[in-house]
């Protein structure tokens, strides 16, 4: 059973461009969470999704950020008009229905 | 909402010694407490977790204890090895049940050979 997959692993964008981060959950997992990690800090929750539904987006900035988890295909975290402060590692985690969350390897976003 | 505090922020031990990392939480309704290990450049790896119906859980050299009255839980690593060197995070559910996790700020463990 493959683990959580994320791509790309590294992404470089210039200010004002768009960033798209993808996450494929573990087989059989229908819950996906996105977290952001700044250097030397813990993980901060952004958004929680189930198939075709956003369950909790309280940790995601209202402007420029959006997320989806379509019926088919990976979950996407989209950042429009990136700024330098968006530079971070973005992790997704997937879960069955019993609390356990398994993390992917992350996408390291660098905004120039 | 939940608040998780983790101590210490850094910990150095000699190979073979034990390491203990402690966390406190604020929401008495929390019922699930995972620990993650993160190596440089990698995602967090779930190493052990405990639910509120038990006080201790062990898996080889790793153990976790939970004190619900005091609202704290601890990670114990015995017979430490250099490959245990990493950043360790504790976490608790934001609101209980299948919800986002609130993480501690992490403990950087260095095992000196």
Image (cartoon, coloured by chain):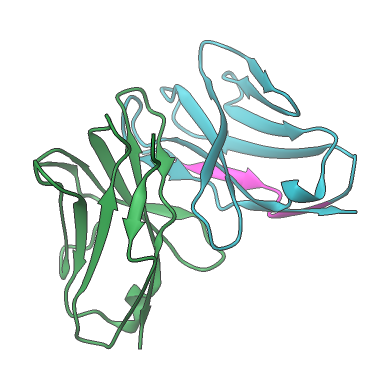
Chain colours: A green, B cyan
Indicate the position of residue B113 as horizontal and vertical percent values: 90, 54
Determine whether, in the image, residue A52 is placed left or right of residue B104. left
Of residues A55 and A97, the one drawn nearer to the viewer in this rendering:
A97
Residue B10 covered by magenta stretch: yes
Of residues B36 and A46, the one drawn nearer to the viewer in this rendering:
B36
Compared to B96, does A105 lie above or below? below
Of residues A62 and A86, the one drawn nearer to the viewer in this rendering:
A86
- Residue positioned 51% across, 29% down in the render: B33
Determine whether, in the image, residue B87 is placed left or right of residue A95. right
Quarter of the view holding residue B110: bottom right
Indicate the position of residue A23 as horizontal and vertical percent values: 28, 52
Residue A59 in view (yes/no) = no
In which quadrant is the C terminus of chain A drawn?
bottom left
Which residue is at the far front? A1
Compared to A46, does B91 lie above or below? above
Determine whether, in the image, residue B46 is placed left or right of residue B27. right
Which residue is at the far top? B53
Compared to B34, does A14 lie above or below? below
Residue A60 in view (yes/no) = yes
Indicate the position of residue A9 as horizontal and vertical percent values: 39, 65
Residue A73 covered by magenta stretch: no
- Residue positioned 22% across, 33% down in the render: A30
In which quadrant is the N terminus of chain A drawn?
top left
- Residue positioned 58% across, 18% down in the render: B69
Quarter of the view holding residue A64: bottom left
* Magenta part, dominant SS: strand
- The span picked out in magenta is B3-12
- Residue positioned 48% across, 34% down in the render: B26
């Amino acid at each position: 059973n493959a683990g959580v997959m994320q791509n790309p692993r590294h992404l470089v964008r210039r200010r004002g461009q768009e960033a798209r981060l993808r996450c494929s959950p573990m087989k059989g997992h229908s819950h996906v969470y996105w977290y952001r990690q700044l250097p030397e800090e813990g993980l901060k929750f952004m958004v929680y999704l189930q198939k075709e539904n956003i369950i909790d987006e309280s940790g995601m900035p209202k402007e420029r950020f959006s997320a989806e988890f379509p019926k088919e295909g990976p979950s996407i975290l989209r950042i429009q008009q990136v700024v330098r402060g968006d530079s971070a590692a973005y992790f997704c985690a997937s879960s069955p229905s019993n609390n356990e969350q398994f993390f992917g390897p992350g996408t390291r976003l660098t905004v120039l | 909402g939940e608040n998780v505090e983790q101590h210490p922020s850094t910990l150095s031990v000699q190979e073979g010694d034990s390491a203990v990392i402690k966390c406190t939480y604020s929401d008495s309704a929390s019922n699930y407490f995972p620990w993650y290990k993160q190596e440089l450049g990698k995602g967090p790896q779930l190493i052990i977790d405990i639910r509120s119906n038990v006080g201790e859980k062990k898996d080889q050299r790793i153990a976790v204890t939970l004190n619900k009255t005091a609202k704290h839980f601890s990670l114990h690593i015995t017979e430490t090895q250099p490959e245990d060197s990493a950043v360790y995070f504790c976490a608790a559910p934001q609101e209980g049940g299948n919800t986002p996790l609130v993480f501690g700020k992490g403990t950087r463990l260095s095992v000196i050979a």
